[in-house]
Amino acid sequence: MTIQKTAQLRTFLVHLILLLTAAGFAAPLVWMLLTSLKDNSQLFASPPQWLPSPVHLQNYAEAFSRISLPRLLSNTLIVSLFSALGMLLTAPLAAYSLAKLEWKGRSLIFAVTIGVMMVPGQVTMIPEFILFYKLGLVGTLIPLIVKPALGVPVYIFMLRQFFLGLPSELQQAARIDGASEGYIYWSIMLRLAMPAVLATGLFQIMASWNDFLGPLLYLNDPAQYTLSLGLQQFQNEISTEWNLLMAAAFLMILPILILFFFLQRTFIQGITFTGIKG
């Protein structure tokens, strides 16, 4: 076998593995879409009926009428956007400080940040709830916004890795020209880090959008429910309306899918750049 044919075979195998992996990740989404277009008799048919016939598009209309989708969407947007904005104000600043500024205790604070990343969220769930309860914020959307806005360790770590990859000569040149530290951060370093910053913002939007445990813990008024909690209305102790649940779930993830397709280049760039230096 010639070298050229060996290379072609290797390329074919790589593409085959990638296609199979992509199909595996896409399978749940395709199953959800197909289920959302079936009626109950098709859902539990034996042998299984993979494709909906006839197609029940009215499932989407019924799902839309069963839950207050505009209200749920509005609450979810408020939580997702404001938590991402808050995180984008604090995480890059903390990451820049840990990566590019010399100050006493920096290594200790970075070690604490790494340590917090290792702690499961369930460990801090009760103390955080007690704190927000004593502040009178339980039953509002504020805890869901404030927690990410105060700093997420994994985002701080990712952005720190990016800032480490930026040349320190830029800082030194700006200082020689008389620029303040605030100007260096805001006008030079933050702009260079924008792909990574936007990527972490997208991560936070997706995390808040899909979060179920947080809203379940802090919200008790249906008027404040987010989309993830709203989906529970299709489940009860006796049965689950799978076709309506899947239709509502597809409507829930549609904005995130559209957002990803429009910003996928920024998303991938940010993930790549944050790992360029350890």
Image (cartoon, helix red, strand yellow):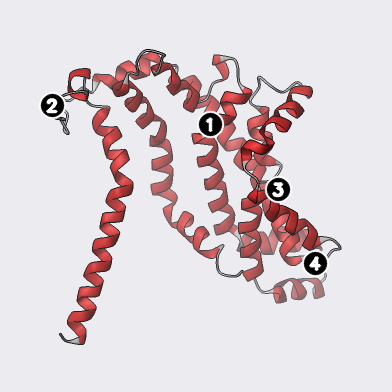
Q: Nearer the viewer, mark 4 or mark 1?
A: 1
Please tell me how crowded label 1 is: few (under 14), some (14-19), or many (20+) other residues with Cα within 10 Å.
Answer: some
Instruction: Reply above or below: 6 against 32.
Output: below
- Decide which of tag 3 and tag 4 comes sooner along the chain: 3
Q: How many marks?
A: 4
Residue at (45, 16) in percent of width and height:
68
Residue at (57, 26) in percent of width and height:
215
Amino acid at pointer 2 = Ser
Residue at (21, 86) in percent of width and height:
3
Instruction: Reply above or below: 66 against 205.
Output: above
Q: Which label is found at residue 77?
A: 1
Instruction: Reply above or below: 139 against 20.
Output: above
Q: Secondary structure at mark 4?
A: loop
The residue pinned by badge 4 equals 179
The residue pinned by badge 2 equals 53
Mark 4 to mark 1 CA distance (whole Å): 38 Å
Please tell me how crowded label 4 is: few (under 14), some (14-19), or many (20+) other residues with Cα within 10 Å.
Answer: some
Q: Position of residue 196 (x, y in %)?
A: 57, 58
Please tell me how crowded label 3 is: few (under 14), some (14-19), or many (20+) other residues with Cα within 10 Å.
Answer: some
Horizontal arrangement in the rendering, residue 32 relative to residue 192 (left or right): left
The answer to whether the residue labelled 2 contacts the one labelled 4, judged by CB atoms less than 8 Å apart, is no
The residue pinned by badge 3 equals 90
Mark 2 to mark 3 CA distance (whole Å): 51 Å
Q: Nearer the viewer, mark 1 or mark 2?
A: 2
Q: Position of residue 93 (x, y in %)?
A: 72, 54
| Depth check, front residue: 145 or 238 | 238
Amino acid at pointer 1 = Leu
Amino acid at pointer 3 = Thr
- Decide which of tag 1 and tag 2 comes sooner along the chain: 2
- Decide which of tag 1 and tag 3 comes sooner along the chain: 1
Q: Position of residue 128 (x, y in %)?
A: 71, 32
Mark 1 to mark 3 CA distance (whole Å): 20 Å
